[in-house]
Image: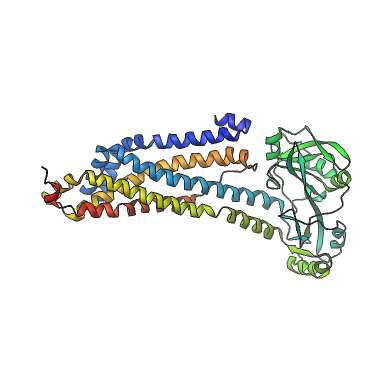
Amino acid sequence: LVLVQRWTGWVWLGNVVTGLILVTACLLGLPVVVWSGKPLRYLLEGLFGVEGRFAAEHIRSSPRRAAAVVIILSAGLGAVLLFASLGRSFEGTYLRVDTLAYRVPIIATSLYREGGYVEAPIEGRIRDELLAVPGVAAAVGERQREWTYGGKSIAVRAFDREYFLEERFSRWELLSRAFPDALERVGRGEAVLVTENLAARSGVEAGAEIRLETAGGETGLLVAGLTSNLAFASSGGAVIMSRDRYSALWRDPMVNRLHVAVKAGADAEAVRREIARRFGERYKLRILSGPQIVAHYAGEVRRAFRPQYVAAVAALLIVLLGVGDSLAARVMERLRQFGVMRGVGVRRRSLSAVVVSEAGGLSMAGVVLAVVGGSTLGWFWTDVQFPAVVGYVLSLYFPYGFAGAALGAGVLACLAGSVIPSYVAAGVVVRDALREE
């Protein structure tokens, strides 16, 4: 099913696969409890002594009740890992590909915006004026334009020739089967590059022709290669070409950004101030650096995924309440057993330790199942379903730090959920527990 969904891009099939993964994870709850019986016994006995051994026996004697606790914990933490994987993968992929695209110390853009996040166009001739500023080694114009292809919105990105040939402006990641001289051809205006999300949606490959409606009519453009650069230009993908070719096809000399490289030994900050002094007010320019642009949009990505922390807290609260309820039910079922233990001299503290160690053992089993289920869902959504739903192609970046903290918090929530049931077990009255014997 995963292979079919990857090939077809059917969103509904991805939702079916997601449901199957969730159902499978829940069905594994009971087998995990049964299979972990002996390891949990040795582990709990080693950690808690006799109380741990009793706890392991309680888990073994009622595996279905124990499985309910494991499923609650694994479902909550699995959801946290899924959203954390998506957020970290989106941010990590963005930082990787846009760090490649914005390498210069100075980028000049308009103060104003059009279409939400795209800077308003400015006169392309400003590029020539920038070259006269002391300390400026080279400048490249960039034009961004929203267009349509195959009935869906895409981006057209155009750069001056140097952008494709000089690594001080950009480093290109070309995917397999790209022409050996792909960047040279694109720089000369003989071919274009397409992003991998556009290629995945349209089936375009290196050597094929992509046809776009331009200001001069329908035009066929040779595809020299696929690239992961500028992957977030548009969810529908992007066509990347030289600005000379773009200007001829669209009859548009404007630019949205000017990438400025400074001479060796020059003070980039001093050059930036001089550009701002000469052109900032006259052309209403904002002068930034490549890292500043990347950091700005990375911050936007983090804000977009900030609700995952609210979801994590909600999941932990559900774990706390669900585990507490399940453990309380298990304690009520064994009140008579706890009464017998108290009758033969077992201390109240030991009875509490039995319940707490039982919660600890179940939390370990739940964490294992959460890691397996959450990681599987995180991989599937990052690699397959998210590109089908949204359009962006992501690389998987597992959130190790956040995942460790979330799993630790899940274990603590499980232990916290055992506090009231352990208090009930410790407070059992022998006479009442054994009254019906």
Q: Which residue is situated farthest in the front direction here?
A: 436
Q: Position of residue 324 (x, y in %)?
A: 32, 50
Q: Quadrant of the C terminus?
A: top left
Answer whether residue 15 is visible to the viewer in this image.
yes
Residue closer to the observer: 168 or 99: 99
Answer whether residue 398 is visible to the viewer in this image.
no
Q: Position of residue 363 (x, y in %)?
A: 35, 46
Report whether 292 appears left or right of 432.
Answer: right
Where 263 sits versus 56, above or below?
below
Report whether 39 appears left or right of 400.
Answer: left
Report whether 272 appears left or right of 219.
Answer: left
Q: Position of residue 145 (x, y in %)?
A: 78, 48
- Kindly indicate the quadrant of the structure image that contains residue 235: top right
| Residue drawn where x is 31% and y is 45% of the image | 326
Q: How many marks?
A: 0
Q: How is the image coloured?
A: rainbow
Residue closer to the observer: 102 or 167: 102
| Residue drawn where x is 47% and y is 35% of the image | 21
- Kindly indicate the quadrant of the structure image that contains residue 205: top right
Q: Quadrant of the N terminus?
A: top right
Where 171 sits versus 6, above or below?
below
Q: Position of residue 48 (x, y in %)?
A: 25, 50
